């Protein structure tokens, strides 16, 4: 029996280290924003706007791709990718049911049909082996999500898509700087969308960006969500000029957020290294904890930690996940479940549900898809077991990581008492 009583049962909490304020902006970033506000330079209608051009060029170089399109949100970036690739008109897009809704809603908003396949049970990442059986003559694209900053297996995914002539979209909204097989995510797809809202790794206030290796995808995406072609943007294709008008989604990037992106990018690699180093220390410290396990990653893969995901092991703990999380939180550690349920079960994807009308109901009805029929056991397992922590530990803190791990160790030492607590309720 442990000499340390659980805080849930009246003991002293272990506590948790303080996370760094995030986002944190440099004096230079704030000075540059102040100058924009003082001069009223808050709208950039052209790619010739210096702050927008600077942000797009800086991000493209950092991502290692030729083209970057700044947008007003991560959802806008993913929607721009679909517009640039002309994935629409009932095209099917194979994607993951284990994620935030934006990577599905962008498909729906462009008149395409999401097709959900299963995920890897420990990481929640799209399972490459599940893709090929789901391909039909309507399949046009694969949309993979690098959830929690974990890199999806883009090598295996590209092998499937190359065999079938499909395009690939990456959702890197939680994964700025994540590496698969030695290359940054965003370099594997025909287009990739990233969110840069204030909670993300590359954080502004609300922004995003799309990257692509293809000039035609970049310009078609630009034309679909910005006011293009009126100011003589260098490189804009002549064949697209007859179709330039104001029938666009207004996803343009504010110069204010463009400045923030440029300045935040300067310190992103250092912050990511701090997050990763701390995650490594925490991983080593909880090695003996059998009730909570962190995913393992293959050679050449390096996550970045927007959040740190782990998996509760009920067979060992002998209590429910809710009780286990309650005990961890009582020790002072913020822990939660990020994905509440598989997206395939969400009511607004049922075209016959009694709900406010949406733009995608008739598209789904015409496709014949009934998402309630999806069989996704690994996704259900990940939803049922996953526990996440915010991970804004951007500077080295070995003592803090061991303190954080000690909360899990303490609960592990007191599982018998926790079982008694659950039975008595």
Image (cartoon, rainbow, N blue to C red):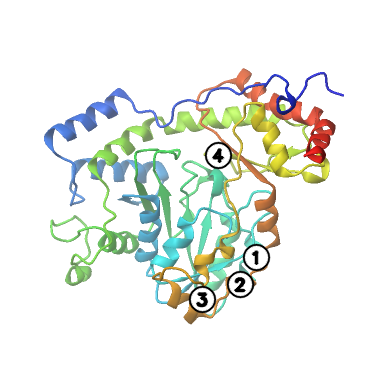
Of marks 3 and 2, the one in the foreground: 3
Q: Residue at x 46, y 48 (%)?
A: 173
Query: Measuring 53% from the left and 57% from the top, which residue is drawn there?
Result: 144
Determine whether the residue tagged by mark 3 lies in a helix, strand or loop.
loop
Q: Please report contact status of discs 2 and 1: CB closer than 8 Å, yes or no.
A: yes
Closer to the eye: label 3 or 4: 3
Name the residue rendered at 35%, 28% in the picture: 25
Task: State the quadrant of the C terminus.
Answer: top right
Q: Look at mark 3 in the image and give the residue it sits on.
A: 352
- Position above or below: 305 against 234: above
The residue that mark 2 highlights is: 134
Mark 4 / mark 1, whichever is N-terminal: 1
Task: Identify the secondary structure beneath mark 4.
Answer: strand
Name the residue beneath numbered marker 1.
130
- Alpha-carbon distance for marks 4 and 2? 30 Å
Question: Residue 57 location in percent, x, y?
Answer: 30, 44
């Amino acid at each position: 029996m442990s000499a340390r009583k659980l805080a849930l049962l009246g003991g002293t909490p272990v506590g948790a280290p303080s996370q760094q304020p995030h986002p944190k902006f440099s004096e230079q970033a704030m000075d540059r924003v102040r100058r924009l506000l003082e001069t009223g330079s808050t709208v950039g209608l052209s790619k010739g706007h210096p702050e927008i051009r600077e942000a797009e060029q800086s991000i493209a170089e950092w991502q290692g791709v030729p083209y970057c399109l700044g947008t007003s949100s991560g959802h806008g970036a993913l929607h721009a990718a679909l517009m640039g690739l002309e994935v629409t008109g009932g095209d099917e897009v194979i994607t993951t049911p284990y994620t935030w809704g934006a990577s599905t809603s962008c498909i729906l908003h462009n008149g395409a049909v999401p097709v959900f396949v299963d995920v890897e049970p420990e990481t929640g990442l799209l399972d490459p082996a599940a893709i090929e059986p789901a391909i039909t003559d309507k399949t046009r694209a694969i949309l993979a999500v690098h959830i929690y900053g974990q890199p999806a297996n883009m090598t295996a995914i590209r092998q499937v898509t190359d065999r079938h002539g499909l395009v690939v979209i990456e959702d890197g909204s939680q994964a700025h700087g994540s590496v698969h097989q030695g290359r940054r995510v965003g370099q594997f797809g025909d287009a990739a969308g990233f969110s840069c809202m204030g909670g993300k790794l590359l954080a502004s206030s609300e922004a995003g960006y799309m990257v692509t290796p293809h000039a035609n995808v970049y310009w078609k995406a630009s034309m679909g969500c910005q006011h293009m072609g009126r100011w003589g943007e260098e490189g804009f294709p002549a064949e697209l000029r007859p179709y330039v008008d104001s029938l666009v989604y207004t996803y343009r990037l504010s110069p204010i957020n463009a400045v923030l992106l440029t300045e935040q990018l300067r310190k992103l690699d250092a912050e990511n290294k701090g997050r990763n180093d701390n995650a490594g220390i925490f991983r080593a410290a909880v090695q003996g904890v059998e009730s909570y396990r962190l995913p393992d990653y293959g050679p050449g893969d390096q996550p970045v930690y927007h959040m740190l995901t782990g998996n509760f092991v009920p067979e060992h703990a002998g209590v429910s996940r809710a009780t286990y999380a309650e005990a961890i939180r009582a020790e002072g550690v913020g822990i939660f479940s990020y994905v509440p349920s598989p997206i395939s079960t969400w009511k607004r994807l049922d075209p016959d549900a009694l709900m406010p009308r949406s733009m995608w109901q008739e598209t789904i009805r015409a496709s014949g898809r009934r998402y309630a029929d999806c069989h996704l056991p690994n996704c259900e397992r990940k939803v049922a077991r996953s526990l996440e922590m915010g991970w804004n530990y951007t500077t080295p803190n070995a003592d803090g990581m061991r303190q954080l791990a000690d909360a899990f160790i303490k609960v592990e030492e007191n599982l018998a008492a926790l079982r008694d607590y659950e039975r008595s309720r």
